[in-house]
Image (cartoon, rainbow, N blue to C red):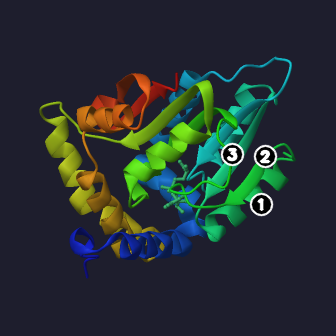
């Protein structure tokens, strides 16, 4: 079966995305390791290094981690800032957040808030955060432009936007290998580990449909951000995009 995800309207897309993440929430962390052979950890470390949250300051560093799911980015931000950062994890999916809350409890972390909300309509006042992060999330949001303007709105002037997302591979040889892996290995791994090939077909399809590095950078500029740029990871399999609200 296919998700036929190309032709659906935005409401239907969000419903599909929600079903995928409700279905995989409990196995999500294991699947990430299996699918990426642990590489997602290196990318996430690089992403949070790029954020470089301060370890000191007169008030906590406020970060909103949107589509934060099971908390991977928030935990790294917490650790890297020596507890000085105050991450707010936002996700539309209660099942993913429940796993995140449980993980936070196990780690004895108390300074992390978990909020169920839509990236397209954030329940926060303008200029509430010093930084906005989103990792492997924006691809799932039906109206990316709305999510980007919400990012711009909730950041304070001088606040930074950072996005980690799958992107376009532009290395001869690697691109073909990556196609083989995406279309043949990933759905089979999904079937073997989670009994769910369809969710992982959705994953591959959504990656293919996401705008490439330059086009996405332009969307970030269009939302009002300045000093927009990007860095490729693993030959463009993923990329970090950044911008500043001036
Ligand atoms: N950031 C986490 C990580 O890197 O491990 C989770 C990424 S997971 C691939 C994508 C997340 O996006 C899911 O938890 C999903 O519920 C969330 N999501 C999808 N649509 C969303 C929306 N409109 N608003 C907020 N979160 C959304």
Q: Position of residue 95 (x, y in %)?
A: 64, 70
Earlier in the chain: of badge 1 and badge 3, it is 1
Of circles 1 and 2, which is in front?
2
Labels 2 and 3 touching (C-beta < 8 A): no
| Mark 2 crowdedness (10 Å alpha carbons): few <14, some 14-19, many ≥20 | many
Q: Quadrant of residue 4?
A: bottom left
Q: Is residue 77 visible?
A: yes
Q: Position of residue 68 (x, y in %)?
A: 60, 51
Question: Could you give the CA–CA distance between mark 2 and mark 3, rounded to whole angstroms?
Answer: 19 Å
User: Mark 3 = which residue?
Assistant: 125
Q: Position of residue 26 (x, y in %)?
A: 61, 68
Respond yes or no on whether mark 3 lies under 8 Å from ligand 1: no
* Residue nearest the observer in this picture, 124 or 54: 124
Q: Quadrant of residue 96?
A: bottom right
Of circles 2 and 3, which is in front?
3
Under circle 2, the secondary element is loop
User: Mark 2 = which residue?
Assistant: 112
View extreme (bottom): residue: 1
- Position of 141 compared to 155: left or right? left
The N terminus: image quadrant: bottom left
| Mark 1 crowdedness (10 Å alpha carbons): few <14, some 14-19, many ≥20 | few
Respond yes or no on whether mark 2 lies under 8 Å from ligand 1: no
Residue 111 is tagged as none
Under circle 3, the secondary element is loop
- Residue visible at 75% across and 25% down in the picture: 81
Under circle 1, the secondary element is helix
- Residue visible at 76% across and 58% down in the picture: 101
User: Mark 1 = which residue?
Assistant: 102
Question: Could you give the CA–CA distance between mark 1 and mark 2, rounded to whole angstroms?
Answer: 12 Å
- Residue visible at 60% across and 25% down in the picture: 157
Earlier in the chain: of badge 1 and badge 2, it is 1
């Amino acid at each position: 079966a296919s998700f036929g995800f190309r032709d659906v309207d935005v409401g239907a897309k969000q419903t599909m995305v929600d079903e995928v993440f409700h279905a995989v929430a409990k196995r999500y962390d294991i699947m990430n390791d299996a699918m990426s052979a642990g590489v997602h950890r290196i990318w996430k470390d690089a992403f949070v290094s790029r954020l470089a949250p301060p370890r000191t300051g007169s008030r906590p560093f406020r970060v909103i981690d949107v589509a934060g799911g099971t908390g991977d980015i928030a935990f790294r931000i917490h650790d890297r800032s020596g507890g000085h950062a105050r991450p707010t994890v936002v996700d539309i999916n209660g099942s993913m957040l429940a796993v995140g809350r449980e993980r936070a409890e196990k780690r004895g972390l108390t300074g992390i808030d978990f909020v169920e909300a839509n990236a397209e309509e954030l329940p926060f006042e303008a200029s509430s955060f010093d930084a906005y992060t989103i990792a492997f999330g924006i691809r799932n949001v039906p109206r990316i432009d709305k999510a980007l303007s919400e990012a711009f709105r909730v950041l304070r002037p001088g606040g930074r936007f950072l996005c980690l997302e799958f992107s376009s591979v532009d290395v001869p040889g690697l691109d073909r290998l990556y196609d083989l892996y995406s279309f043949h290995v990933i759905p089979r791994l999904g079937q073997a580990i989670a009994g769910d090939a369809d969710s992982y077909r959705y994953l591959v399809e959504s990656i293919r449909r996401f705008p490439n590095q330059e086009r996405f950078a332009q969307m970030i500029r269009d939302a009002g951000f300045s000093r927009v740029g990007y860095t490729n990871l693993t030959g463009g399999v993923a990329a970090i995009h950044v911008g500043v609200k001036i």
